[in-house]
Image: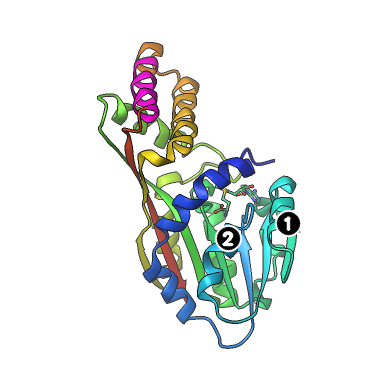
Amino acid sequence: MSGFSSEWLALRAPLDLAARNRAVEAAFIEALPKGALHLLDLASGTGSTVEALSPWLDRPVTWQLTDYDPRLLQVARERWPENTRIRQIDLQADLEQLPFDEVDAVTTSAFLDLASQDFLERLADKVAAAGKPFLASLTYDGRSDFDPGYPKDAELLEALNRHQKSDKGFGPALGPDSAKTAISLFEDRGFQVVSGFSDWQITPKASAFLLEFLGGWLRVGKELNLPEDLLEAWWQDRRTRIEASKLFMTVGHIDFVALP
Ligand SMILES: C[S@@+](CC[C@H](N)C(=O)[O-])C[C@H]1O[C@@H](n2cnc3c(N)ncnc32)[C@H](O)[C@@H]1O
């Protein structure tokens, strides 16, 4: 299983929805064929791409949702009982088994930063061979800013970005370099790419999210053996501000659509 809980995905969902780049999504929707659609979503989790795109698609859509985590897929099945096919699949092992030729387009969100160079090449090859539009939303790009900041934020961010490049099941992950690499791979295959930022704009209202998210930073800092006193002072400051509703944050993401 993936280590992404449905509770965590639900906490980030409102930020994801607000952050999605509308110009990129519009370019994707414009490129779709007329009439009923069949869309393939990779690493769907609980189906947030369905929620995000449905308001903009004014015709019948059959979604094929894929993930290797059965708990997340079960939530997706309950959320989207109609016109949705659910397929449990390990994308690293079995990407080539998916029916790229039979769908109208391929989507994914909050996923490419987990992938390796090798996996992105396989993915770009499959999408290019099928000649389908590809929408990748919300790929983390390595930028994070706090307001107010704390002197050790940069040190933690550097550690986090290093950790993002560890193996997430696909070989060494590209982490913050993923979106740029994927864009180049699609351009090399003759695709036209439209990209834009989709940053999380996190306000103090998202305190439950911030506690969980920065708790994750703390765990990474411990895993990477950053000095205990540094970590404790940082967490004490950040947590106090979150609890006092005084911490804002921006987290950088990139959305792109690759058009054949
Ligand atoms: C950050 S979540 C994003 C989920 C969803 N797309 C969203 O935007 O909410 C990353 C997803 O990738 C899935 N995943 C990770 N490695 C995978 C693999 N090898 N095969 C299939 N799914 C995988 C996880 O189970 C998880 O659902």
Residue 115 vs 131, above or below: the answer is above
Image disc number at residue 249: none
What residue is shown at x 46% (from left), y 31% (from top)?
A: 211
> Is residue 83 found left or right of 152 in the rendered image?
right
Q: Position of residue 96 (x, y in %)?
A: 68, 63
Residue 113 vs 100, above or below: the answer is above
The answer to whether residue 17 is visible is yes
The residue sitting at the bottom extreme is 34
Residue 87 vs 63, above or below: the answer is above
The answer to whether residue 260 is visible is no
- The quarter of the rendered structure image containing the N terminus is top right
Q: Position of residue 188 (x, y in %)?
A: 42, 69
Q: Which residues are magenta?
A: 232-243
Q: Position of residue 162 (x, y in %)?
A: 42, 34
Q: Secondary structure at mark 1?
A: helix
Please name the residue that numbered disc 1 is placed on.
78
Q: Main secondary structure of the magenta part?
A: helix
Q: What crowding class fits label 2: few (fewer than 14 Cα within 10 Å), some (14-19), or many (20 or more)?
A: some
Please name the residue that numbered disc 2 is placed on.
122
Q: Earlier in the sequence, mark 1 or mark 2?
A: 1
Q: Is residue 236 magenta?
A: yes
What residue is shown at x 53% (from left), y 68% (from top)?
A: 53
